[in-house]
Amino acid sequence: MASTQLNLDAVIVGAGFSGLYMLHRLREAGFSTCVFEAGDNVGGTWYWNRYPGARCDVESIYYNYTFSEELLNEWTWSAKYAEQPEILRYINFVADKFDLRRDIQFKTRVNTAHYDEEKNRWDIQLDNGQSVTAKFFITAVGCLSASNVPKMKGLETFKGEWYHTGHWPHEKVEFKGKRVGVIGTGSSGIQSIPVIAQEAEHLTVFQRTPQYSSPARNTAHDPEYLKEIRANYNEIKTQMQQSAVGIPVVQGERSALEDPPEERQRLFEAAWEKGGLMTLSSTYNDLSINPEANETAQEFIRSKIREVVKNPEVAEKLLPSFYYGTKRTIIDTNYFETYNRDNVTLIDVRKAPIQEITASGIKTAEEEYDLDMIVFATGFDAMTGPLFKMDIRGKDGVSLKEKWAGGSQTRTYLGIGTAGFPNMFMLTGPESPSVLSNMMVSIEQHVEWVSDCLNYLRENGLGVIEANEDAENNWNQHCREVADMTLFTKTDSWYMGANIEGKARGFQIYLGGVGTYRQICDDVADKGYEGFALIPSKEPVL
């Protein structure tokens, strides 16, 4: 196989939601295309994240493709928030319906992708020794696919089992009769902890940062409700595309400080009872920009934690203090209630840091805990991490990692391209709305923009497209200015790269809103891809 060389119009890395749709669009347009996927099946994040309790936090009716009305009518979601197995079934259904697997090479990693300036092509080396060349190199690697296992002293000596939520085994992990330790209380920790607690003999949670989390209030779907949704989906799709976060949420029109305390309490209570991802955060229009307004939401959630958790000392450990919403917004099913169980212990590792993993468990500054299993719910090296797992080199042999030395130096144009890397497109890349939006809406927008761009290049005899450095710098500055208007940059979070030791701080997401971002991208295209350098093709038009 090492002697075989594929010559393609486009190579796509990753067979998750973005890679599959990109493949479908390019293949329909007549481009020779292949997807390379490290896993042995489609699914992306939903292939790898199989941990107990894994569930989407965007309502299932909004978390699906919208490009095909036929597809919308053929699939039915079982519940308001779909679990991982159901989402994975959906992705497989899509792959089968559009016969996508025939152009996907599984169990294959892209090791290197180097741009050849003489040929205006990408030379790509795979981990099986195969070489590929492509006119266009498209990354569909996801924003949260590089698992972060902290470098902990002694992990290699641990005699029990250990797992990371972002790289979970395909077979069921048995917790029954075992002493389990979970490190981390982000989204994956908060989803998995209640499920593990129900099965384990004892669960010890090692918490560094308490989180704001509100109830999901998950329910099964009423068939009549789904029928109504299908009948009105074109209107719903437009609302999603024009919204701030890709979900048709009604945003409050006034400040949290304009209401008297009793009215504010009433609205927060109603949002809490309704449940859902954006319900509480959209109650008022200034929770993400006004510290005093934000404090009202903080204190409301803290009061709820005190109500739910029976032991005051445990409740106190669970009270967060950062700006609400500036870390990933989390919804849960019985998370705080889990700490009322007799078989659950909460350890505050800010007070008693973990010193090492021992052969028999975890040793903190205060005590040693005997464990049969450790679960790392420690998240990901987000945004740039998945891209840096490949050796991507553009013009003059400069690597992407060198160009973006330190997270604060990440610069893109629209989150799609980056100067010095011609004919490379990033789907939901840094400085696009990506993880602070409904990913399905952002994925479809990026895929459609990129495929339209490739059609434009072909129709106009153009062989190379590259982001201009000035346009990139202006976009980077705009992204920073918008972010600095909010409270997001005032909190250490994985949005800022704060969860990765040695990673420079830098906010890498566009906060101007999904609808605004779509209009900006459309305007760029309408102006002949303004901000990009376009060079005539040296070879016959594709």
Image (spheres, helix red, strand yellow):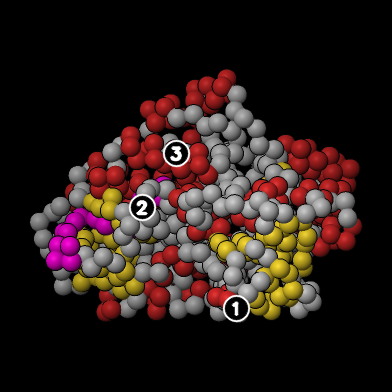
The circle on residue 315 is none
In contact (CB < 8 Å): disc 1 and disc 2:
no
Point out the tag, 2 or 3, that comes first from the N-terminus: 2
Query: Which residues fall within the magenta stretch?
Result: 1-19
Point out the tag, 1 or 3, that comes first from the N-terminus: 3
Mark 3: amino acid: Arg
64 relative to 363 in the view: left or right: left
Residue positioned 79% across, 77% down in the render: 366
Q: Secondary structure at mark 3?
A: helix
Q: Which residue is mark 2?
A: 40
Q: Is residue 144 visible?
A: yes
Residue positioned 25% across, 53% down in the render: 34
The mark closer to the camera, 2 or 3, is 2
Residue positioned 40% across, 75% down in the render: 401
Q: Which residue is mark 3?
A: 89
User: Disc 1 versus disc 2: distance between alpha carbons?
Assistant: 31 Å
Point out the tag, 1 or 2, that comes first from the N-terminus: 2
Q: Which residue is mark 1?
A: 154
Q: Is residue 143 above or below residue 257?
A: below
User: Disc 2 versus disc 3: distance between alpha carbons?
Assistant: 15 Å
Question: Label 3 crowding class (10 Å Cα cut-off): few <14, some 14-19, many 20+?
Answer: some
Mark 1: amino acid: Gly
User: Disc 1 versus disc 3: distance between alpha carbons?
Assistant: 38 Å
Tell me which corner region of the image, top left, top right, bottom left or bottom right, holds residue 100: top left
Mark 2: amino acid: Asp
Tell me which corner region of the image, top left, top right, bottom left or bottom right, holds residue 98: top left
Q: Secondary structure at mark 2?
A: loop
The mark closer to the camera, 1 or 2, is 1
